[in-house]
Each structure stands twice: as C-alpha cells, then as structure tokens.
Image (tube, grey):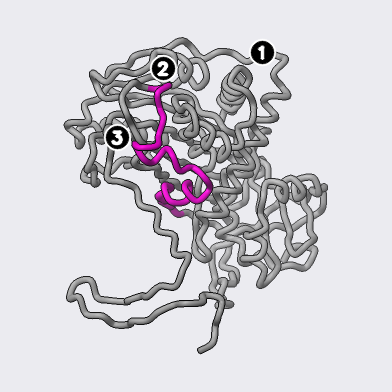
Amino acid sequence: MNRSGFPLQGALAVVAGLMFLAALGLLVAGCGSGGSKAPVLEGPAQTKPSSHAMEDIAAVASGGNAFALDLFGVIRPADGNFVCSPYAVSTVLSLAMAGARGQTEQEFRTVLHADLADASLYPALGALDVSLSEIADFVPASALWGQAGMPYQKAFVDLLGRTYGAPLRLVDFDDYAAAAQTINQWMYDATNGRIPQAVDPDGPRADKTVLMLTTAAYMKAKWEEPFQPSLTRDLPFRLPDGTEIRVPTMCGLRDEYDYMEGDGLQAIDVPYDDGRLSFMVVLPAAGGFGEVGEALTSERVDEITAALATRHVTLQLPRFTFSSSVDLKAPLRGLGLVAAFSAKTADFSGMTSEQTEISGVGEEAFVLVDEAGTEAAAGATVTFTAGVSQDEVLLAVDRPFYFLIRDRQTGAILFLGQVTDPSRHGS
C-alpha cells in the first residue's frame, strides 16, 4: 500500500507502454551511426543548434508528444504487457518525411504533427536531437541503408546528415540475407544487444528493396535512489480479469516523490540519477484500466505532469522485463499516412528520381525494470521498394453484405450469414 490507500496493482501494461513516453519525452529526433561494415557515404556534419530556436524546439517536442499518444492509442493491446518507443518510430518516419513531396509529405506532416515550415522544422529537429544525445544514459542512432547504384538526391542525404547525423550506408539488397545481417548487426550494436533482429533475413520481399531507414534507441539508467534487493518480496498483483497473482515487488526507501491522484488514477514520477530522465507510473483505479488508456492523450499527460507535487509516498513497484514487436503499416494508415504505401500515389522525389513506395514499417522494443534501474531499447525500420507493386484495394464495407466463416485448409464453410443493418443487435 502507498500512503494514500490505493494498491499499486494493475499498472504493469501502462508502465511498460509509457516507458519511453515518460523517460524520453517522446521527442522526434535521432542521431549517431554505430558500427557496420557497409561503405558509408558521409553527408555534412550534424549542425549545432542556435540559441534562438527554443520556441521551435518546443513546437517539435510538443508535436512528437501528440504523435506518440496517437500511436500508442492505436497499437496498444487491450490486455497484456506491451512496450514501444514512439520516439524511435517518429524519428524513422521523420527520416522518410525528408524525402517526401506533395500529398505524401503533407500526410507525414499531419500524422507527425510537424507544423513548422521546412526552414524551421529540420533545424529544430536537429537541435532536439543534439539535446537528447547529451543525455549520458540515452544513446540514439539513425542510419540510411541504400542499394548500391541507386541514385539518391544529394540534398536528401545532406539534410539527414545535418539534422540527424545519419549516414548513408551502401548495401546490396539483391543479396537480401547478407544486407539484413549487416543491418541487424548495426541494430544489435546500437542497442547493446537488446534488439538482435530488426530485419527478417527470410522475410517476404516480393518487390525489390532499394532503401531501408533505421533508428535505434537505447537507455540504461540507475535510479536516483536504488531499491534494495533485500526488500523485494512477492506481493499481490491483480490482473485485468480480477485474478490475483503474486509477483516480485520492489519497495522503495525514498520517502518523497512527485505524485498526483485524481480523476480515476494515481501517478508518480521516479527519477533516475542522471537528472534528466524519469519513470512515470500512471496507475488507473481498479476497473479503470481501459478507460484511462482510451483517454491518454498528450494533453492528458501534460495535465498529469502539471499536477505532480512532492508527497510522502511508499512505493511498491513490480519488477518486470519483456519485449514487444509491432507491425506499424496498418496503424499508420489508420492515422492518415496513406499515399506513402502505394507506388501509384507515393511521392519520394526528394529522396530519389526512381519511383518508390514504403512497403513496411515495424518496431521491436525491450524493457527491464529492476532494483538498480531501467534498461530499455527499441529499433524501428522503414523499408522502401521500387516500382509499382500490386494495386492497393480499398474495400469500404458501407452497404449490406454477406459473410462466411470458413476453414481455409479444407474449404468447409462453418458459418454463413448476411448483414443489412450493423446497428441492430437483436434478431
């Protein structure tokens, strides 16, 4: 029990899902390179931020937060542990946005809440990136993996060099397994081995891959006041269905935390020893997990953060570790990024003169929370393919229809019916 009388139960999935939201600030950025044997075409060095860009930095940070909660809202599962890094996703999408033009670029901007003009946007993203890179416990890295012989716009390569410090590395995607191995080694190195495979060497690739964008994020931070392992003990944890289990639970010695409660939740901010990062727990009241998750917007996080005040709290926090993997193509389309996924509508002429489309977006993530602190890692990828792929089909089921539930192996129809009014629930 904490001193306000609420059991610290039912928070595990929210804790994990918010891991990078609280700790990293959900900032749209990315930098660095990491080791790789691929030939590197270096662009200009990353530009240091100017002192007058603070308002623009705040604007891109705010936009990054809005995208983060938008994304979390559509990819978090209703039940089960889940962790993601919207930071890594927004970064890798920003790399792609730099080469987009026309409607494709506008959709990127809308989804990423990137409202500044180009002249201010990329310098602000770069300034934010430099600031994040100065955090001792956090290591970001981004890179471009281009097909050898493919023409890439120099302005695109230079922009990503100035903004993110992201080099263009040349690989041969015709030998896809070897290219994947090279990229995976880079990701492995950039995440201290926590993301060993961001690209499946045996994955489907019906079209020719011509470019892959990658962003890695790695943090390993110690608590400002570590939990004592001798105080960790098995305590009850209530699952969403009401079942009670017992899990190893850390008991804090620290007496004062930034804390708030109200509107069906409690929140606590646990600092790390670097002075910049913190681990925020958002704990819904019993039975309110889904409701709080649905209402978790960037504005709501701002309200929670603003309401934090120093209180005497006895903290009992479960110890946990797990990984998550998510295919982001469908969720991003649902948020409004549509044109980029079809060669017929995608415009990446700012990146290359060849017709390309995004064929895949994915992320792997890892989190570990124990008595010493937190280790977390994520790897996000965007894959581009050349040429016109199979036509994208929009099937809007907006009129009466029939349905069949069948065994795909034998062809046996198990259920058959029709729908003429989806709003009717009775017979």
Up-down relation of residue 364 to residue 101 (above or below)? below
What's under tag 1, amino acid-wise?
Answer: Ser
Examine the structure image and report whether residue 323 is included in the region drawn in magenta.
Answer: yes
Q: Residue 267: which quarter of the image?
A: bottom right
What's under tag 2, amino acid-wise?
Answer: Val
Q: Which residues are magenta?
A: 322-351
- Residue displayed at 36% across by 75% down: 403
Read off the residue under disc 1: 50
- Residue displayed at 51% across by 28% down: 30
Q: Position of residue 3 (x, y in %)?
A: 79, 63
Examine the structure image and report whether residue 94 is included in the region drawn in magenta.
Answer: no
- Residue displayed at 79% across by 54% down: 260
The answer to whether the residue labelled 2 contacts the one labelled 1, judged by CB atoms less than 8 Å apart, is no
Q: Circle 1 — which element?
A: loop
Q: Circle 3 — which element?
A: strand
Q: Residue 338: which quarter of the image?
A: top left
Instruction: Please give the label number shown on residue 385.
Output: 3
What's under tag 3, amino acid-wise?
Answer: Thr
Read off the residue under disc 2: 157
Q: In front: 123, or 261?
A: 123
Q: Specify few, some or many for label 2: CA neighbours under 10 Å numbering under 14, 14-19, or 20 or more.
A: many
Compared across the picture, whether 121 is left or right of 39 comes to right
Q: Circle 2 — which element?
A: helix
The disc, 2 or 3, on the residue closer to the chain's N-terminal end is: 2
Residue 140 in view, yes or no: no
Q: In front: 363, or 256?
A: 363
Q: In front: 341, or 248?
A: 341
